[in-house]
Amino acid sequence: MTLKLDDGEKAGFDILCEAIPADLAEDVIRSRRKKKAIMTARIARRLVEQYRAYGNPERAAEIHVAKGWVDFQSAWAKKGEDFRDTFNPTPVKETREQYLARAIQKNNEDWEGNSRARQVRQLMAQAVKQ
């Protein structure tokens, strides 16, 4: 450990190390120091709880440090990942195959409901019978 810690920070550091690597825990403490925010055992427990709520504690701590946030809420980090443009109806996590299947389904539904298309199908069926 290259960081000199007081008693409160040491307790917080130990708690952070239960969920994330020691070098990342030091980065979290450094980041909070730059913002003049203290680190205590209670704050560390709450941070670890939020890191785990994110689903990947290490990735959550990296986001916390990279964004320069004093605090961390898993909802804040997830909000950016689940962003969806209201003017774009395509789901964010839709693969190309899913998009094509959805487009084909929509096309078939449009074709089925179109009266002109129904007439074309009837004419085609008559032509095949002859």
Image: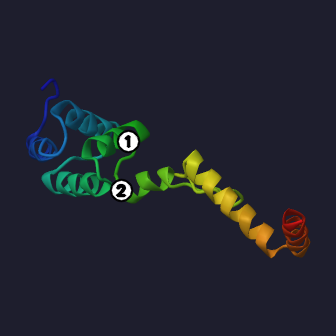
The numbered mark at residue 35 is none
- Identify which residue is drawn at 28% across, 56% down: 50
Q: Nearer the viewer, residue 96 or 29?
A: 96
Looking at the image, is 68 positioned above or below residue 107? above
Looking at the image, is 37 positioned above or below residue 113? above
> What is the secondary structure assignment of the residue under circle 2?
helix
x%, y% of residue 8? 12, 46
Horizontal arrangement in the rendering, residue 14 relative to residue 114 (left or right): left
Q: Earlier in the sequence, mark 2 or mark 1?
A: 1
The reply to whether residue 89 is visible in this rendering is no
Task: Name the image quarter holding residue 74.
Answer: bottom left
Q: Nearer the viewer, residue 83 or 77?
A: 83
The reply to whether residue 16 is visible in this rendering is yes
Looking at the rendered structure, the number of numbered marks drawn on it comes to 2
- Identify which residue is drawn at 87% across, 69% down: 117
Horizontal arrangement in the rendering, residue 68 relative to residue 44 (left or right): right
x%, y% of residue 58? 26, 41
Name the residue carrying label 1: 63
Q: Seen from this angle, which residue lies furthest front?
A: 130
- Which amino acid, mark 1? Ile
Q: Nearer the viewer, residue 14 or 51?
A: 51
- Indicate the quadrant containing the C terminus: top left, top right, bottom left or bottom right: bottom right
- Identify which residue is drawn at 87% across, 64% down: 124
Name the residue carrying label 2: 74
- Which amino acid, mark 2? Ser
- Identify which residue is drawn at 66% across, 63% down: 105
Task: Name the image quarter holding residue 14.
Answer: top left
- Indicate the quadrant containing the N terminus: top left, top right, bottom left or bottom right: top left
Horizontal arrangement in the rendering, residue 6 relative to residue 26 (left or right): left
x%, y% of residue 39? 21, 47
